[in-house]
Image (spheres, rainbow, N blue to C red):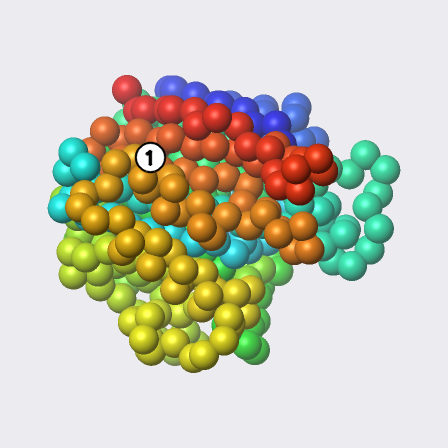
């Protein structure tokens, strides 16, 4: 894995131009053409009305590529460099449970180490990189129109976010929903927010979980690849999980307690005791039980090192499993900081994996 720390400053239009240049130079990505002009126009109007910062970034993309922002034949709202949904584990730790009293998000991002072709069942093409070989630790510091943000970005540069924190202490993370069947992905751009835009939208537009609840209930949403659910929390310790089913939206409240989330929906089974027996799809039930027990086994408020040790019990390192924990990150909602360790590869000698030391980033 080769991780780039990307710090962006300026107007949102200038930031959009910077991202368009990175997408072109590093990934060979340019705005897509050939989509439905009606859908493209509806998407652009939704962003202009509901997410002005993203609309301004689209103008920056248009500047770099010499196209008209209002051209309905060009998709300016995405700079995608592959996409899919992860299976992960997250623990939200409110202030009373953490040494120092800083509300904390601990997150494993688990994903296959193969290329897109391999994940789809084929053989890797010459020169094809693993899907998550080029993630970004990204900082966005717009001069106006959106909160500053520190976040992990993969698969889509212009509006994508996997987990992050903003300047107001709002913290977010996404996790795949591995239980739902009969999914109906768009597999193409659609009006509103897709699964990896939703968190960036919240970070840029919301200061608190109260604002985030309202924003989510009002926002038009869809998923392009696989359904996800999302943990949202703030520096005061309030948290909730956002889930959507075919005809309903669900807020699973944390009530100021520890919230553990893996890859099954919580709105109908919020307690570990409600889960079926067995490991569940992608071992989601087993990981939820194991992480909950690991956190509970440590008495008193947890230090950062104890949080790392507790979450290590669900690191994906099994040689027979096709995915790995590509990063473990700890967000401090008060300091607006991130400590993160990245997967560097398997270690055949030990039968384990190699990981980077924890690196620290903080919004200035």
| 64 displayed left or right of 236 | right
Residue 173, position as x, y percentages in the image: 38, 48
Q: Quadrant of the C terminus?
A: top left
Q: Quadrant of the N terminus?
A: top right
Q: Nearer the viewer, residue 102 or 3?
A: 102
The crowding category of the residue bearing disc 1, from other C-alpha atoms within 10 Å (few below 14, some 14 to 19, many at least 20), is few
At 24% from the left and 41% from the top, the residue drawn is 302
**Is residue 190 depicted above or below 133 in this figure?**
below
The quarter holding residue 165 reads top left
**Is residue 109 depicted above or below 9 in this figure?**
below
Q: Nearer the viewer, residue 232 or 360?
A: 360
| 329 displayed left or right of 295 | right
At 32% from the left and 24% from the top, the residue drawn is 362
Q: Nearer the viewer, residue 320 or 61?
A: 320
Q: How many marks?
A: 1
| 274 displayed left or right of 285 | left
**Quick one: SS at disc 1?**
helix
The quarter holding residue 20 reads top right
At 78% from the left and 38% from the top, the residue drawn is 128
Q: Nearer the viewer, residue 298 or 363?
A: 298
Residue 41, position as x, y percentages in the image: 51, 52
**Is residue 126 depicted above or below 3 in this figure?**
below
Residue of label 1 = 305
Can the viewer see residue 339 in this picture? yes
Can the viewer see residue 63 in this picture? no
At 65% from the left and 55% from the top, the residue drawn is 321
Residue 226, position as x, y percentages in the image: 55, 62
Residue 228, position as x, y percentages in the image: 46, 61
């Amino acid at each position: 894995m080769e991780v780039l720390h990307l710090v962006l400053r300026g107007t949102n239009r200038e930031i959009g131009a910077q991202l368009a240049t990175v997408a072109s130079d590093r990934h060979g990505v340019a705005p897509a053409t050939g989509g439905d002009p009606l859908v493209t126009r509806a998407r652009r109007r939704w962003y202009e009305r509901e997410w002005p910062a993203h609309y301004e970034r689209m103008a920056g993309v248009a500047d770099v590529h010499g196209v008209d922002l209002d051209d309905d034949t060009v998709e300016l709202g995405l700079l995608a460099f592959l996409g899919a949904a992860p299976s992960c584990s997250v623990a939200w730790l409110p202030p009373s449970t953490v040494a120092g009293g800083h509300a904390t998000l601990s997150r494993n991002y688990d994903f296959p180490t193969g290329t897109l072709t391999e994940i789809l069942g084929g053989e890797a093409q010459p020169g094809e990189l693993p899907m998550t070989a080029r993630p970004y630790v990204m900082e966005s510091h717009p001069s106006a129109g959106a909160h500053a943000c520190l976040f992990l970005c993969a698969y889509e540069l212009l509006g994508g976010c996997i987990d992050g924190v903003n300047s107001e202490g709002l913290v977010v993370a996404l996790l795949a929903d591995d239980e739902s069947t009969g999914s109906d992905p768009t597999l193409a751009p659609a009006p509103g927010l897709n699964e990896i835009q939703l968190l960036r939208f919240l970070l840029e537009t919301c200061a608190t979980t109260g604002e985030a609840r309202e924003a989510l209930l009002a926002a038009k949403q869809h998923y392009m690849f696989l359904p996800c659910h999302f943990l949202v929390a703030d520096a005061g310790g309030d948290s909730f999980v956002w889930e959507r089913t075919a005809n309903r939206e669900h807020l699973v409240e944390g009530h100021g307690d520890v919230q553990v989330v893996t890859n099954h929906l919580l709105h109908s089974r919020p307690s570990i005791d409600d889960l079926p027996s067995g490991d569940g799809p992608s071992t989601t039930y087993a990981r939820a039980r194991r992480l909950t027990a690991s956190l509970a086994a440590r008495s008193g408020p947890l230090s950062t090192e104890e949080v790392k040790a507790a979450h290590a019990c669900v690191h994906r390192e099994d040689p027979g499993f096709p995915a790995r924990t590509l990063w473990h990150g700890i967000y401090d909602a008060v300091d607006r900081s991130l400590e993160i360790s990245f997967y560097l590869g398997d270690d055949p000698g030990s039968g384990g994996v190699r990981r980077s030391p924890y690196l620290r980033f903080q919004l200035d």
